[in-house]
């Protein structure tokens, strides 16, 4: 009984420090101008909930334009990872080719490098391709994530080899084995990397800030930086802008959560 109480106590503590800031931000975004948000013991529930903060943000800044730009970038990154990371993961896990271990080692080595080390070379590459100040230039470096490749490799490697051997006996080529055996068994992990790719592209701030200069091309995270400067004296509007940026992440995760948790456990495929 004591162990169960301790377990639930720890779970409640983790829940509080994880969800607490979000609930406080949501509460602030719904509070009216006459409600005090600087009290020593802030109220979680607004006394007079209002959506005026959201309306004022939408009227003052082109938030929808920023959100549309972020969606374009996220779509490119998702498609790139869904196709590129899946194909690369399958090749590393199921195909035998010369230099395969060297390629796998190179993928692992890239995970050690922080983004700040490679950001200058990425910027030079994007500029040389003529993609500076474009949404494609923002999305291209994240179109195939090394971590996503390794996750897909792990998922494909968990498929029993006997299934491939039986397919080869039946005359199936590599593409047929990939589409008919590999993909059906890694749909959960594919959902995982889709969520990771979307969140990474949607929340990225440093790279779009460096690449983009035209206000028409700003992504939502960079646009919110200007929002913070515009409404520095009104935290209610800043909180409303933050919630606008957070809503798509909630929708994506809520839609794919059952596939996400199945993908996390996908390494235990049984033959």
Image (tube, rainbow, N blue to C red):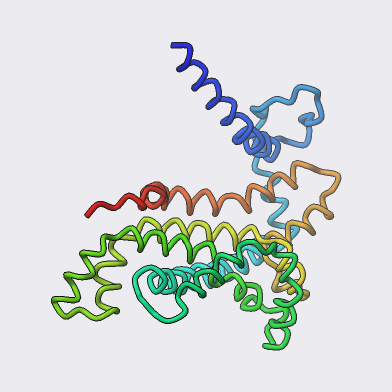
Q: Is residue 85 above or below residue 24?
A: below
Q: Residue at x 75, y 67 (%)?
A: 209
Residue 180 placement, left or right of 218: left
Is the residue 224 above or below the residue 136 in the image?
Answer: above
Quarter holding residue 98: bottom left
Residue 212: x and y in percent read 74, 73
Total numbered circles: 0
| Residue occupying the point 75% across, 47% down | 238
> Residue at 68% of width from left, 39% of height from top?
25
Percent of width and height locating residue 160: 26, 60
Q: Position of residue 269 (x, y in %)?
A: 29, 53
Could you tell whether 181 is left or right of 18 in the image?
left
**58 to the left or right of 193:** right
Q: Quadrant of residue 124?
A: bottom right
Q: Is residue 248 left or right of residue 17?
A: left
From the viewer's side, name the closer residue of 36 and 140: 140
> Which is more toward the observer, 158 or 191?
158
Q: Who is closer to the viewer here, 155 or 20? A: 155
Q: In the orientation shown, which residue stands out farthest toward the top? A: 1
Q: Quadrant of the N terminus?
A: top left
């Amino acid at each position: 009984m004591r162990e169960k109480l301790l377990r639930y106590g720890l779970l409640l503590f983790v829940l509080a420090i994880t969800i607490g800031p979000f609930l406080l931000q949501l509460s602030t975004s719904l509070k009216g101008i006459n409600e005090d948000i600087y009290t020593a013991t802030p109220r979680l529930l607004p006394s007079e909930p209002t959506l005026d903060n959201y309306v004022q943000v939408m009227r003052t800044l082109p938030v929808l334009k920023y959100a549309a730009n972020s969606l374009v970038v996220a779509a490119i990154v998702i498609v790139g990872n869904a196709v590129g990371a899946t194909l690369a993961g399958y090749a590393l896990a199921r195909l035998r080719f010369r230099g395969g271990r060297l390629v796998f080692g190179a993928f692992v080595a890239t995970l050690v490098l922080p983004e700040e080390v490679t950001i200058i070379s990425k910027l030079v590459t994007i500029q040389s391709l003529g993609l500076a100040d474009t949404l494609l230039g923002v999305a291209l470096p994240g179109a195939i994530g090394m971590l996503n490749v390794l996750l897909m490799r792990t998922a494909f490697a968990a498929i029993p080899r006997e299934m491939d051997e039986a397919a080869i006996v039946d005359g199936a080529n590599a593409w047929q084995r990939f589409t008919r055996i590999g993909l059906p068994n890694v749909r959960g992990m594919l959902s995982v990397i889709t969520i990771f790719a979307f969140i990474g592209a949607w929340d990225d701030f440093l790279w779009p800030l460096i690449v983009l200069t035209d206000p028409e091309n700003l992504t939502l995270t960079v646009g919110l930086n200007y929002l913070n400067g515009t409404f520095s004296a009104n935290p209610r509007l800043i909180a409303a802008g933050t919630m606008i940026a957070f809503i798509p992440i909630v929708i994506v995760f809520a839609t794919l959560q059952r596939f996400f948790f199945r993908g996390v456990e996908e390494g235990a495929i049984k033959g």
